[in-house]
């Protein structure tokens, strides 16, 4: 209400695990409870649904493979949204950046397939980063230099990306003699190895992009908290005036953070196009870019949290399909409702339970504390 | 209503913010028709207490009595109904509305404005006459000077039937002359039987205007005294809990060569408004140059240009004899490398990243220095070691370098910023509002540090809106008004009246 309410008094200490573990768990529990009520209303047993969901996501090797394959995409988009958040930016455009990143991958795989695996794959990965990064750089430039709001421009760039991809697949890249908007299949030596190629596992889409995603988590942590470049991005995000005062250019860092963000989102294309579909198709991004926002929020923009949140959403995607298959009243749309509830509670309503939980712990610590 | 009961009485009020016991067993009695001062350092709990009275916060324990009867004050509406009005430090006015529209905001009377406006106009005419609060009710608030806007706030409270008026640091934005005018208004209010509560950390104001004064320290009321029975030194001692030096002790300055100067500098902001007009300044080694002036008269822009975050529209910046105006070095990062330290006016907005730990703030602006980097990796142990050194040398408390900057009090935050900038051993130090929101005890320390630096032959520029501070700290004083330097004088020749007149734009400066 007034500025006095924020000005006075230093915040009381709340144990770190409360914010990092307890609050997300409470949000998750609330989402599951509400989902349970919905399942009850449509006439199924929520406990049984829960069992099917968990078994469907983790219960057997094949399920786990699919879960980790989805997780890979969520790690990419979660990290992408998170680095933008660290710079104080809301990147809604991960979806479009992933599409364009995939386009880059596809172009390399289609036209540079004379090169051997050891060259074409790194170039394709680089292309994913460059294309995705470029798609984010334009809104970033407009935000940094012209003040156009990045939320609006990245949303619009999603539509443009979708249209560009459709046009190219319908008019230009379509497989010769093909009837559907997709390119020809890539040469086999450009495909990323599946896990089941080198491990005794059943056939799943899980490929080495997952390892790449895990490495990026480590790289993300190192960049953000252990280099001066990450420091500059975080200063810009937390306090732009302080950044200017310290000789840190907000414009430069906004553009840099968004390029990295777009590159990370672009790697969805590596997993999907080079890892799974082996051809350029439409709609391979499947909403991963948007769910990445929830992943980043729930993971508190930290790679460990993002990995866990990505795993959760991966499990929901995989377990959810199983759920739609196994339970008589639950269909695909119902699963999306459950996913939506989780996104709602851990993303949009992220702060609903926080004050109550924090107050509980503050009161406890205050009654224990001896006055300084 | 019994005349013997005090206008406002607090009984054993307690308030916690989490673990922070912001108000401890506060009892206070304010007599009707008096001006009651509440004084205390920043963070002593004055603002919290008044926010409780005004209904922004609820007390966790204790009673509030208005005119002898207990009141449940849960929100500002209840407080207004109890006859309490508040004039906030930052005015709560709509700049694009007229005075009249602002005053009736929230009490329009009906959905149609016309009736309410007419009623208000008549009522305001009466109030203005009664309390000699002349204001043009049809003027747009955005066009009015701050002193007048404050009167609008007072009128607003009176229009809502306030019998008790709380003023929170009312003179922070006023020239001494405007402050005097405010005090005359407060006197009239007292004569008319209103009760005034004045929250301030300025001892001068307490002595000048109040009947009684209550002193707060660390959330507690430590004394209630009649103003006539006390003096500045005694009050300062009560506030801090030990005796303090109110004046800065220093030898005469030994000014040497000019380190940095501005020549005919002008600055136009984005809207084309002239913020700096033909500024000429020389900042010399071994001397403290003070810039006095009411805030918002170009001091911020001046600091930003010298600090390298703004480019002048015209004119030259000369650093160590070299015109750097168009040099690639003229930016905040490179100026630091060639010996400029900068303590910004607003440590919350610029000087610190509050959500970062103290040690991460230690490298702000210096994060690409070799001492903080090992190759591409930031050297956390070196950052922490430097921060620990700063904490020890500048007596920052608590002594934990991993604590978030927001967890330190204002004075300790300022010490962290000062330590960062001074420990790089700059040749010139720009200091904006060195002691804004800083406890008296820490003020003494900060002033001593600045004097020491001056005596070590460094050039120092101090910008402050506290006229006392400029007078006691600076060796030479330049006064700014409306983007121009009205005059420059030797600190020895400066008097409060002289500076006050210059701050109001009267060109009477004696050339030094």
Image (cartoon, coloured by chain):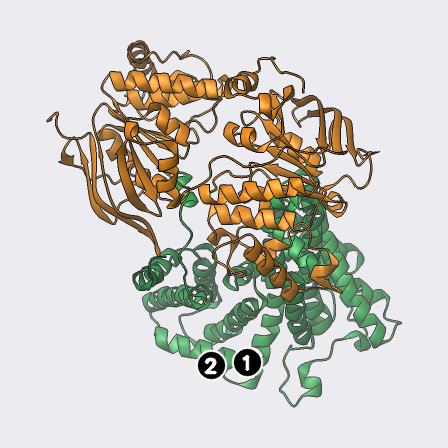
Chain colours: A green, B orange
Whether residue B407 sits left or right of residue B383 in the image: it is: left
Name the quarter where the C terminus of chain B is drawn.
top right
* Element class at badge 2: helix
Residue appearing at x 35%, y 67% in the figure: A33
Residue bearing mark 2: A55
Residue appearing at x 28%, y 23% in the figure: B160
As measured in the structure, the alpha-carbon distance from the residue carrying label 2 to the one carrying label 1 is 8 Å
Residue bearing mark 1: A63
Residue A282 visible to the viewer: no
Pointer 2 local density, CA inside 10 Å: few below 14, some 14–19, many at least 20 = some
Residue appearing at x 74%, y 62% in the figure: A128
Whether residue B444 sits left or right of residue B327 in the image: it is: left
Expressed as whole percent of the image width and height from the top left, the position of residue B310 reads 70, 34
N-terminal of the two: label 2 or label 1?
A: 2
Q: Nearer the viewer, residue B231 or B184?
A: B231
Residue A191 is labelled as: none
Q: Nearer the viewer, residue A59 or B408?
A: B408
Q: Say above or below: A365 vs A162.
A: below
Quadrant of res B228 = top left
Q: Nearer the viewer, residue B38 or A337?
A: B38
Expressed as whole percent of the image width and height from the top left, the position of residue A5 reads 39, 43
């Amino acid at each position: 209400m007034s500025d006095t309410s924020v000005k006075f008094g230093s915040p009381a200490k709340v144990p770190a695990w409360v914010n990092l573990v307890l609050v997300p768990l409470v949000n998750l529990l609330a989402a599951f409870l509400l989902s349970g009520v919905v399942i009850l209303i449509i006439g199924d047993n929520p406990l049984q649904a829960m069992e099917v969901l968990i078994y469907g996501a983790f219960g057997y090797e094949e399920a786990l493979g699919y879960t980790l394959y989805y997780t890979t995409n969520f790690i990419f988009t979660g990290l992408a949204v998170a680095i933008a958040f660290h710079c104080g930016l809301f990147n809604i455009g991960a979806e479009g950046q992933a599409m364009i990143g995939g386009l880059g991958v596809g172009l390399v795989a289609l036209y540079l397939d004379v090169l051997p695996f050891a060259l074409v794959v790194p170039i394709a990965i680089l292309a994913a980063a460059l294309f995705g990064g470029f798609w984010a750089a334009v809104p970033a430039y407009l935000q940094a230099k012209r003040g156009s709001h990045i939320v609006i421009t990245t949303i619009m760039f999603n539509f443009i990306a979708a249209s560009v991809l459709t046009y190219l697949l319908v008019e230009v890249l379509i497989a010769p003699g093909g009837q559907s908007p997709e390119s020809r299949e890539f040469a086999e030596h450009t495909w990323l190895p599946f896990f089941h190629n080198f491990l005794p596992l059943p056939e799943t889409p899980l490929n080495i992009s997952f390892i790449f995603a895990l490495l990026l988590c480590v790289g993300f942590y190192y960049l953000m908290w252990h280099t001066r470049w990450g420091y500059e991005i975080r200063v810009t995000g937390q306090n732009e005036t302080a950044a200017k005062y310290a000789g840190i250019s907000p414009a430069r860092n906004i553009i840099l953070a968004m390029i990295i963000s777009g590159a990370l989102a672009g790697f969805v294309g590596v997993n999907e196009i080079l890892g799974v579909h082996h051809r350029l198709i439409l709609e391979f991004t499947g909403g991963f870019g948007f769910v990445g926002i929830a992943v980043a929020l729930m993971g508190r923009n930290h790679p460990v949290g993002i990995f866990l949140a990505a795993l959760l959403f991966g499990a929901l995607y995989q377990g959810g399909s199983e759920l739609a298959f196994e339970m008589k009243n639950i269909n695909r749309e119902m699963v999306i409702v459950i996913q939506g509830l989780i996104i709602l509670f851990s993303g949009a309503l992220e702060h609903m339970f926080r004050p109550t939980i924090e107050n509980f712990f503050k009161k406890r610590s205050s009654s224990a504390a001896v006055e300084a | 209503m019994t005349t013997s009961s005090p206008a406002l009485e607090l009984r054993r009020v307690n308030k916690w913010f989490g673990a922070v016991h912001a108000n401890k067993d506060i009892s206070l009695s304010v007599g009707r028709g008096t001006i009651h001062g509440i004084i205390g350092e920043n963070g002593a709990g004055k603002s919290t207490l008044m926010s409780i009275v005004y209904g922004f916060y609820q007390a966790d324990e204790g009673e509030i009595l208005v005119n002898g009867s207990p009141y449940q004050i849960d929100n500002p509406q209840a407080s207004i109904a109890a006859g309490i009005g508040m004039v906030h430090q930052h005015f709560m006015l709509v700049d694009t509305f007229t005075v009249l529209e602002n005053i009736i905001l929230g009490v329009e009377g009906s959905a149609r404005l016309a009736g309410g406006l007419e009623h208000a106009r008549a009522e305001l005419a009466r109030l203005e006459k009664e309390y000699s609060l002349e204001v043009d009710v049809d003027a747009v608030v955005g066009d009015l000077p701050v002193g007048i806007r404050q009167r609008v706030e007072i009128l607003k409270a009176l229009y809502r039937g306030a019998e008790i008026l709380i003023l929170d640091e009312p003179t922070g934005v006023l020239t001494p002359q405007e402050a005097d005018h405010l005090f005359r208004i407060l006197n009239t209010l007292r004569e008319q039987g209103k009760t005034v509560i004045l929250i301030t950390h300025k001892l001068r104001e307490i002595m000048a205007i109040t009947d009684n004064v209550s002193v707060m320290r660390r959330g507690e009321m430590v004394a209630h005294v009649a103003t006539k029975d006390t003096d500045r030194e005694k009050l300062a001692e009560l506030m801090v809990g030990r005796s303090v030096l109110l004046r800065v002790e220093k030898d005469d300055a030994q000014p040497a060569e000019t380190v940095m100067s501005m020549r005919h500098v002008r600055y136009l902001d984005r809207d084309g408004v002239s913020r700096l007009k033909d500024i000429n300044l020389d900042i010399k080694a071994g001397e403290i140059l003070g810039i006095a002036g009411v805030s918002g008269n170009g001091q911020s822009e001046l600091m930003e240009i010298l600090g390298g975050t703004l480019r002048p529209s015209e004119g030259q910046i000369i650093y160590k004899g070299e015109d750097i105006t168009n040099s690639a070095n003229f930016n905040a990062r490179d100026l630091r490398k060639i010996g400029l330290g900068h303590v910004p006016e607003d440590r919350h907005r610029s000087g610190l990243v509050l959500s970062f730990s103290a040690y991460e703030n230690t490298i702000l602006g210096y994060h690409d220095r070799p001492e903080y980097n090992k190759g591409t990796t930031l050297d956390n142990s070196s950052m922490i070691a430097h921060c620990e050194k700063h904490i020890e040398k500048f007596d920052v408390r608590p002594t934990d370098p991993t604590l978030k900057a927001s967890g330190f009090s204002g004075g300790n935050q300022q010490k962290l910023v000062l330590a960062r900038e001074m420990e790089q051993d700059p040749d010139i130090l720009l200091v904006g509002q060195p002691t804004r929101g800083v406890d008296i005890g820490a003020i003494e320390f900060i002033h001593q540090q600045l004097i020491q630096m001056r005596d070590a032959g460094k050039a120092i520029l101090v910008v402050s809106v506290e006229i006392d501070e400029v007078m006691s700290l600076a060796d030479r004083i330049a006064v700014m008004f409306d983007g121009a330097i009205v005059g420059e004088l030797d600190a020895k020749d400066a008097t409060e009246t002289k500076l006050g007149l210059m701050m109001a734009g009267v060109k009477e400066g004696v050339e030094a």
